[in-house]
């Protein structure tokens, strides 16, 4: 098939191009002009800023894909400018998605596969939730509420139209080039003793290795299934388990414990939420409907090792 990967320089997008080509697909890599030097080896590279509607229409038309894969984000900016990273990513999820859908239709594509996140559910109900659980669109933190509303709008656009729409809600990514890699930002905070464990560390994390994110995207390209899927490993775990494990793997100090009510001041609202009240994500639907399962079933075998 002819496949276009938007966001082809990203943590998932870059290896995804190679994985699709290895499966015999003809792959076009869509990148911004400023990122062209970092583009992966592809059958062709097309250039457009996803927020520029006309440029996207032109680039996708030139590629003539049957399937468009949306891996767009601006999270590369997190180290230098977190507010801009989240704001631009929200725009890519709303405006960029709309541009890709319009361009895909105009180019005659039949299928759209888009990345989302598996940790945007409201903190209510069971510790581990399925895809039908409500998203945290009314979170008390304005930044996170804005992020989740953008996620909800991306998912609505992808699944509401006449394209075969697939949303892959990735778990918290670990592995090469992620924040949880040994040289990543979160790992650095753990090594420096700057990531304490608030309260009992009851927040549940569902992890996903980058290789499994790539594998799920390949499966979604080749499948006929549509809908929203949690793409996570099989081992949702509370922060009280995974954070000390990560510290041990990094030979870092054991995380100190702090009262939960002090955590927002030390860590910010989002990280406090993740460590104290977030819900995990069940991957049953991806297994049964999409036909995907993780090759790394548990974060315990790899988190902190790469």
Image: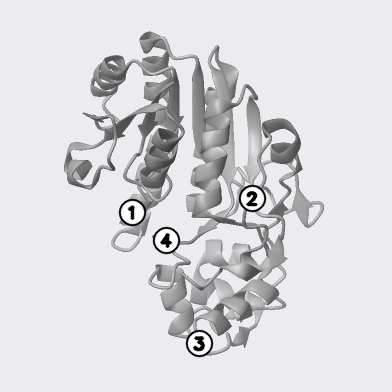
What distance separates the C-alpha of mark 2 from that of mark 1?
25 Å
Q: Which mark is residue 251?
A: 3
Q: Nearer the viewer, mark 1 or mark 3?
A: 3
Residue at (73%, 48%) from the top-left corner? 282
Residue linked to disc 2: 294
Residue linked to disc 1: 76
Packing grade of label 1 (10 A; few <14, some 14-19, many >=20) is some
Q: Tell me: 148 left or right of 54.
A: right
Report the quarter where the N terminus lies.
top left
**Which element type, helix, strand or loop, lies under badge 1?**
helix
Residue at (43%, 35%) from the top-left corner? 20
Percent of width and height locating residue 221:
52, 28
What distance separates the C-alpha of mark 1 from that of mark 3?
26 Å
What distance separates the C-alpha of mark 3 from that of mark 4?
18 Å
- Mark 2 touching mark 3, by CB under 8 A? no
On screen, residue 91 above or below 44: below
The one nearer the camera, 38 or 277, is 38
Figure disc tally: 4
Can residue 131 be seen here? The reply is no
């Amino acid at each position: 098939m002819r496949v276009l990967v938007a966001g082809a320089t990203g943590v998932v997008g870059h290896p995804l191009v190679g994985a699709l080509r290895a499966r015999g697909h003809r792959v076009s890599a869509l990148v911004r002009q400023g990122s062209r030097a970092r583009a992966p080896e592809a059958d062709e590279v097309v250039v457009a800023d996803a927020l520029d509607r006309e440029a996207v229409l032109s680039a996708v038309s030139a590629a003539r894909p049957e399937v468009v894969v949306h891996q767009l984000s601006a999270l590369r900016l997190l180290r230098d400018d977190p507010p801009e990273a989240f704001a631009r990513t929200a725009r890519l999820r709303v405006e960029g998605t709309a541009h890709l859908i319009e361009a895909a239709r105009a180019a005659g594509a039949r299928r759209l596969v888009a990345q989302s996140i598996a940790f945007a559910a409201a903190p209510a109900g069971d510790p581990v939730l399925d895809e039908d659980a409500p998203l945290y669109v009314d979170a008390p933190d304005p930044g996170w509420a804005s992020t989740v509303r953008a996620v909800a709008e991306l998912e609505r656009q992808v699944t509401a139209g006449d394209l075969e729409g697939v949303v892959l809600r990735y778990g918290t990514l670990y592995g090469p080039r992620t924040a949880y890699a040994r040289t990543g930002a979160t790992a650095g905070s753990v090594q420096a003793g700057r990531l304490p464990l608030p309260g009992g560390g009851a927040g549940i994390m569902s992890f996903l290795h980058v290789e499994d994110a790539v594998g799920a995207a390949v499966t979604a390209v080749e499948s006929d299934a549509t809908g929203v899927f949690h793409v996570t490993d099989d081992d949702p775990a509370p922060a009280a388990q995974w954070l000390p494990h990560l510290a041990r793997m990094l030979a870092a100090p054991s995380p100190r414990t702090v009262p939960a009510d002090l955590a927002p001041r030390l860590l910010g609202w989002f990280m406090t939420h993740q460590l104290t009240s977030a819900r995990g994500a069940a991957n049953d639907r991806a297994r049964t409907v999409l036909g995907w399962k993780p090759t790394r079933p548990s974060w315990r075998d790899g988190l902190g090792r790469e």
